[in-house]
Amino acid sequence: MNNYKKIAIAIIALLSLLVVLNIGLNFWINKQLPKIISDKNETPYAISYTDLSINLLSRTISAEGIAIIPKKRDTVVNEKLGIYSKIKSIEINDFKIWPILFNNKIKASSITINTPQVLLYKKTEKAINNSKSLSSEVFKPFQEIIVVSKIKLHKGNLKVIHTQTSQPILSINNINLEINGIVINETSLNNTIPFMFDDYNISGDSLYYKTNEFYHLTAQNIQTTNKDLKISKFKLTPEYSRREFTSKLSKEKDLFTLQLDLIKITALDWGFKNKKPYFNASKIAIEKLAANIYRNKIPTDDLSKKPLYNKLLRDLKFPLKVDTLAIKNSLLVYEEEIDFTKGPGTLTFNEFNLIATNIQSGFEQKKLKDIKIAINCKFMNNSPFKVHWNFNVLDKKDRFNFTGKITNLNTASLARFTKPYINATTKGTFDYLEFKIDGNDYNSYETAALKYHDLKVTLYQKNGSKKKSVIKSVIANLIVKNDTDKKTTTTTVKTERIPEKSFFNFLWLNVAGILKQIVI
């Protein structure tokens, strides 16, 4: 036998061996893989499928008709808990053979999950109680079966349901995501986010999330990566009517209703470091915000001290930094009501535009730039109003500077606030009001210039707000100066802060003090 024949025989033998090995491996893996998924599955979940195929050449695994349910169920109350899921198909790419043969685990480059329908039943009304529950209920069980560095998910739906009410706590439809560079280990499972990653891209529709007893939020569309976030048609809606909300309060508290067309966050950097959250962004832009703030005076006053914004940001226990906050083409409405008999007093700020820069918490900071806020809007729908507001977060005296300028204010428009709130209306025009307030946590010193004409006051009877109090109105108009004789009148006022009241109450006391000095 010559050398060529020997080589040919050796090659044929080797190929035959490879074929036999391939057949053997294929047989063994086909036998072993179902055991990993079912018999040797030590997770709390039972996994089934209608079809499973393995291709050793391309090293791919595909499954169809997957169902995931908890192995145990609370038979006492017949209550569902944990994850219930149906998945159209799963594709696992570039899997490694040895972990399947010897470690009863699938290790692969990526997994693609198509059209998953996921229901997570929880005993509490919190979508995620804490990071440990997320680790123990979701990530750790499936880490025992499969390890991948990339996850793709197409057209998924998720609902988190409260078992006691059978109502959703969280739901989102048409979820598409891709997460790259995933690492899950014992260290990451103890972190607030139970896995590490390089980058992600997530989108979804029709978000619903019940934030707490009093509010739920919705959004039409969410798109986010590790660098930016965009949310459209966002709403924060109260769970209760104003009467119901007020009846549940032991102390005064504002009721918020918010909606906006679009929020965009750019150059986003967030996460957890040493189990503390951090949030950094280059810009947060909000388009067409409509915000309503309602307060009823029936509940008892909250007599706790209200810190100014310097202290609120200074005392935050985590890093926060936003270079620019921009609110455009928006509407702010504040309503305050003594009871439910007269309706609320209303103040409106429409065509509202705000630019704020250098927003930062004081956490571990020794020096910070001043936060600067510029507002341009129309007050009560017709009067141009401009504001410049500066303060420094690290200033422990909580000093601030606030300047405002309003022109061509028809005081009759204030009737929406003054009539239900203080039983009074006015006529006349503030041609020009400019004021500057230098304040701190205890008091303020303000200077102002005012020009007005044809000012008249009408007072109403307390027990019948539609009836004028003629005598009181005459006396009031004798006290009030009708105009400033076509001149600008200036004044200075010092105002003491009421520490149990908010910053905006402090501003109102300043403006009221100015008007009292000039008008009376």
Image (tube, rainbow, N blue to C red):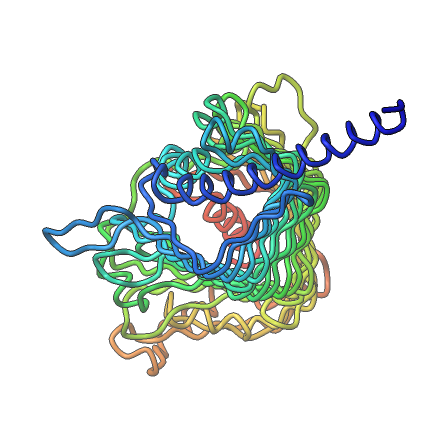
Above or below, 317 relative to 136? above
**Rendering coords of residue 307 (x, y %):** 44, 35
Q: Residue at x 77, y 27 (%)?
A: 10
**Rendering coords of residue 373 (x, y %):** 67, 44
> Does 421 sit left or right of 164 as displayed?
right
Quarter holding residue 67 = bottom left
Residue 255 visible in the shown view:
no
Q: Residue at x 78, y 30 (%)?
A: 9
Work out whether residue 452 or residue 443 is closer to the camera in this orientation and state it.
Answer: 443
Work out whether residue 448 or residue 231 is closer to the camera in this orientation and state it.
Answer: 231
Above or below, 153 relative to 294? above
Work out whether residue 390 or residue 59 is closer to the camera in this orientation and state it.
Answer: 59
Work out whether residue 424 or residue 479 is closer to the camera in this orientation and state it.
Answer: 424
Above or below, 381 relative to 15? below
> Does 321 sit left or right of 4 as displayed?
left
**Rendering coords of residue 75 (x, y %):** 13, 52
Q: Residue at x 51, y 66 (%)?
A: 206
Q: Residue at x 69, y 60 (%)?
A: 328
